[in-house]
Amino acid sequence: MSEQRRIGVYICHCGGNISDFVDVAAVRDAVGDEADVVVAETALFACSDGTQKDMEQAIRDQNLDGLVVASCSPKLHLFTFRGVARRAGLNPFEYSHVNVREQDSWAHGDDTAAATEKAISLVRAGIARTRLSEPLDVLTVETTPKALVIGAGIAGLRAAIGLADVGLGVYLIEREAELGGWVGTLGAMFPADRDGREMIASLVAEVRKRPSIIVLTRAELISKSGSFGNYVAEIRVRTDGEAGQVIRAEVGSIIVATGTDSYQPEAGEFGYGIDGVLTLPEFTRLVDSAEGPLTRNGRPVRTIAYIYCVGNRQPGGNEYCSKFCCTAAVHDSVKVSRLDPSVHQYHLHRDIRTYGKYELLYTESRERGSVYLKFADDAPPSVALGPDGRLTVTTTDTLTPGAELAIPADLVVLVTGMVARQNDALKSILKVPVGSDGFFNEIHPKLRPVETMVDGVLVAGACQGPKTSAEAVASGLTAVTQTAAILKKGVAELDPLVAAVDPAACTWCGVCAQTCPYEAIASVAADGKQIAVISATTCKGCGGCAPLCPADAIDLRGYTDAQITSMIDGMAREPVG
Amino acid sequence: MSTSSSETAAARAADYDVLVIGGGIGGMESSLKLGDMGYQVLMVDKESSVGGRMILLSKVFPTLDCASCISGPKMTSAVHHPNVEPMLYSEVQGIRRLPGGRFRATIRKKASFVDNAACTGCQDCEPVCTVGVPDNFNADLVARRAVYLPFPQAVPKKVVIERLGTSPCTDTCPAGIKAHGYVSLIRSGKYEEAFQLVADATPLVGSLGRACYAPCETDCTRGELEAAIPIRRLKRFIAERHYQGADGPGVAVAEPNGRTVAVVGSGPAGLTAAWKLARAGYRVTVYEKEDQPGGFLRHAIPEYRLPGAVVDADIANLTAIGVDIRTGVTVTDLEALKAQGYDAVLLATGTPRSTRLGVPGEDLPGVVSGLEFLRDVRLGAGASLAGKRVVVVGGGNVAMDAARTARRLGAEQTLVAYRRGREEMPAHLAEIADAEREGVLFRFLVAPTAVTGDAAGNVTALRLATMRLGEPDASGRRRPEPIPGGEFTLEADLVIAAVGMSPEPATFETVAAADRGGRIEVDPKTTQSEVGYLFAAGDVVSGASDIAQAVGLGQRSAFMIDRWLTGQPMTGFAALDDRLGVVDKASVLARQREFGHRDPVVPDSRYSAEPADFAEIEPPMTEAEALMAAGSCLDCGVCSECGQCVAACPAGAINLNAKDEFVEVEVGAVVVSTGFRLFAADAKPQYGFGRYPNVITGMQMDRLVAPTRPFNTVLRPGDGKVPERIAYVSCTGSRDKQVGNPLCSKICCMYSVKQNQLIMGALPLADVTMHYMDIRAAGKRYDEFYEQAKSMGATYIKGRVAEIREKENGDLILRYEDVENGGQITEAEYDLVVLAVGIQPNRDVDRLFEGERLAQDEYFYVAEPDADLDPGQTSIPGVFVAGTAAGAKDIVDSILHAGAAAAQTAAHLERAAHQERPGHQERPGQHAAITAEVPA
């Protein structure tokens, strides 16, 4: 393209995140002389209101027709700077985001000269892309004012009620025959001793009152098609003795609230398998079902030892903390003490994490006589069956150095945490990424805490990571808020950065359709031949099809072959000078 | 300018669906989401920028994103969202639930004294501001100005001026002089600007600097500590600097407006009025019956207090700007004067008449009035009193001046005879004390009954009655009554009668009435007489007062004459008196735990028990003394009204006369998002915060490592040293029944761990140790974050710190129980200690709701009656709570909680809309496509 462009380039310090390792002034100087660059500036925080205003001013005053900001990941601020362009009257797709933080300064903190060179190359690539950018219009689609909630645990139930209450239709599907999930199995829960079963019953009653909630139990999602705002979900409902029925639901968004599993210790792990060694859920059920002092095999339980962090905070294993288990175990000890204040309870822990107001339970537990002993991370307790047939827990208390304590116990409670559900079928249908801990990943814990990389698919509750019941409810309601924020408008805007077929070049070999993970490509007859056509609303712009097309008939808007080539050329040039 | 009547009424603003109180992360999140859903949101925050506390943080755990990167764009969105109206620097005063479930809220929009439409955020005002206060946005680590942008990323980027009220010195000044203003200008070395600030009010800068009785000093808050700031002498200092160097007053004078004013009398009231009018463009002629102008300044106040040269210099200010002063002219006919072509006449003839003793022998030649005596001496007609016995009758300032003057003329004995006691003397305390120092004797509770003379007419004695104090009289003072049989005789050669002064009604009686005291009757607010053209100012209106009061009345007259002659209504008093209401001294003193001692700057005055001449007693201040004295100012009202910002603002955006506004809004729901308070670390005295400079809080450390940090590195405040051994003390103010907070604050462990990592990045050689009780890394990726800090080299020691002691070099010794090593009591030494302070409830909403109480939990957080299933729902239907107002939360949890509150709010609004329009069915048949429902 020979016509002159007028491009503004901003290099962000990110308050030191970038400028501590990249000489941002050098980057600005190096790209300031590039052809078509009219403005080259640095900014302490490009995303700050003041700098955004400066950019808008420059776009107007200097008649800029392209904007490049070199800053953080586009996951944070792509939309921020597109907004700058839009407010200043520049087509937002004339904006190119260059990541010199996650992909440069944070990765190359040990070599600032090279990090600076890399930044120059990356910014040059961004400029090259912008030179060839074209104005694009966002795709606007009408949205369906309904949501699908997967999982009718406490988060899903509460979310369904919340959705109905803001005027959205709801499909609430539950894999099991009963609604309620984990909480539906529990008695008095921390912190307020509310009965889990009763809470679930009250939520189910509320659900029943709302005609706009359709409840499907023994139901599973078997496919998802369409795109954000207009998904089509197929749900199989199992019925006894039959193959079941498939229901097709049109929804604008999907809230995943599939919950969590409890860690199941391996045989022998802290004595698991020996009679009297229980996991936290097993013990909680025992306490909840007791009507008087605890007994085990007909004998009164006099001594209980709790071993914390079983299945959590284990290097090489589940490294995360499940955050609820300390408080749950502490609360159980209070419940035991209420049943029989004379029971001896020993808590072998690695720090008690009864955060916030839960601290009051920890205090109450100690006041009721529970003894808390800290063991070292590298010296966990062991559990064995003594010659007298009693369980013995052996530990080294850090407060009594050198002394190994042997605690005879009637019950040993392994305070087990949460683990992500192995739900591979659902994961492959939703295509929501999971983290190294196996839980669903949100886009950003603070910016977009319940959204996922798949537009219109949200996560709520403990499927996203360990949560208490109340936290799961709060995140369920936040998913309601986010759903309402996108569906109450009635229309959704989709990125136009999607693949498009050149009908003249296409010979319909079908390679593109086979590779498309979103089933966005179909063949149609046109001008006497079959050609590929790509649904702009279904295409996610992943670009998988474009390089495979033998006829070079597919281009990705915003990332055309010409743009990619020029970006490589830009990067390949000598970095300085 | 507006009148006060409309200023207090709340204007009715538009109605909104939701009122969100608080623009921190929780409030912004709720507002943005509700706005996205299409609801109209009013978001109120008491600060001038949205962002709350989060924007002040360095990076945030566990992602280590910059707080700015997360919060900044949310701030921009919140302020620019089409459905969110920000109302900043505003406070919700009260909320009432209306029948039907909606709410009416009254909001005070605090005056920022800056026009937001004009302010560009250039901050040119900040460097010229003469007041520095602790920068609360930098956790008090550094200072900011009284005019300030809260922080560089503020949204919107508008400065505000912090004015807590009018400082007591300025508030009490009858002359309307910005006392705090010129003190702060002097402190900044801006002596000429200080002179100009005073000269804006009156030309008599030098005279007031010598002879004002300085009520400012009486009211000075510093007086509650060591001693008041010598404000009067500071004024003298700037006058002397100016008169030594400057050529003319250097003030701005308006173009002549063609109107003329005659001023009768050249005392402080007349001269001040003439000055104000002349500068406004009037042609002013001053008539003075004496041969020299100045009135009492020149003819009553003795030379040793106010040298004639100083009066000359002050009066030269007037002549320099063209005021025509005609001396030796006695005006007897005001109507005739007016007829000479003046548009208005100001009478400022003071109180030339002396009150008579009313006793036999009063007319003997050896009896003179105080005024007459003083005037003669000033005019050089004072004869030697060597060997004479002088009795001065009276207890006022004239009596003191006369007595001290008599001492200077060589009187063998000078005695003041006063009919009440010492405590009742109307003279200024300093004058009484000075008279005593100079050998003046006092007889209290005595009143003259007769003067006796010899055949030649010389006074020989004064006959006095002994008095006692009876019932209070009209003035509130106890009336003296003679004790029967208590008369006695005092030998005397000269009797000076200084028992009162009054105006001379003959001057004005033909055109205006006089009251019983001989004072002209004018409208006290406008100073205008019934004859429209005639105004009056000074003692002729008030009776005998003092210079500052006369100056104040002169200003008032000039202001009203200008309004009258320009056809404006005779109002506008708010512009004449722009005081905000005086700052409470107790609140000023409560700002700091303790104040450093400042030696008072006292003059080395040349007192003598045998004063021999009329040389000025009080020496001038040196520059060093002036800076020391002005530097002790406590900046009571914060802004000193020095006016530097007004002059510096290129946009003309600053208006110091702005007033608070009140608006009323009706809303469908309320979201309380008022956040938290950080634990005040000095409430844990064993950790030494506030006493040991190198003990800081977690918030202060966050500022030290923030991208917008106050210094370029992490340093310890005590001596600026870069610390090598840094300790964290967790659970400061949390999990601690001693301070009344048994709760865990949840955030402190993680922000400490975050800071541990940031410090190790910033200071690779530093050792970082955290003394903790339990590391509560409870949250997604939090424990991994903690493990990362350990792997980077941070040390974690379990055990509560019992106390911190400071070594002489500022290093700190921590005493703690080493739980993981057998619980030994151990001590460790560090360069810098960071207290990981917890959070406490913000009590801002305690009394927000009228007629009903927003329930709180037992720890005073906003209660959520069903936190398990209805997070965000409070005890009042339609009122929701978002974020830390309901309890300790980190940012992630606050955002989720705010999201939940938004869902609850939306549900409430939908229900309310449904009840309002019962026919409005929700999209019937919407779900008809579903045929299969399987019962649970």
Image (cartoon, rainbow, N blue to C red):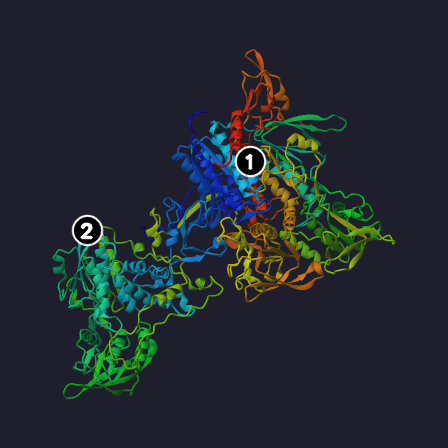
Q: Position of residue B456 (x, y in %)?
A: 14, 87
Q: Count residues near mark 2 (Cα–Cα under 10 Å), then give few for <14, some for 14-19, many for 20+.
A: few
Q: Position of residue A285 (x, y in %)?
A: 75, 46
Residue B908 - label = none
Q: Position of residue A146 (x, y in %)?
A: 59, 31
Residue topped by disc 2:
B257
Q: Amino acid at mark 2?
A: Asn
Are the residues under marks 2 and 1 on the same chain?
Answer: no
Say which chain tag 1 marks: A
Q: CA distance from mark 2 to mark 1?
A: 66 Å
- In the picture as drawn, the residue positioned furthest to the right comes out as A387
- Identified at 58% across, 12% down, the residue is A529
Say which quarter of the image contains residue B275.
bottom left
SS at badge 2: loop
Residue topped by disc 1:
A484
Answer yes or no: is residue B915 visible.
Answer: no
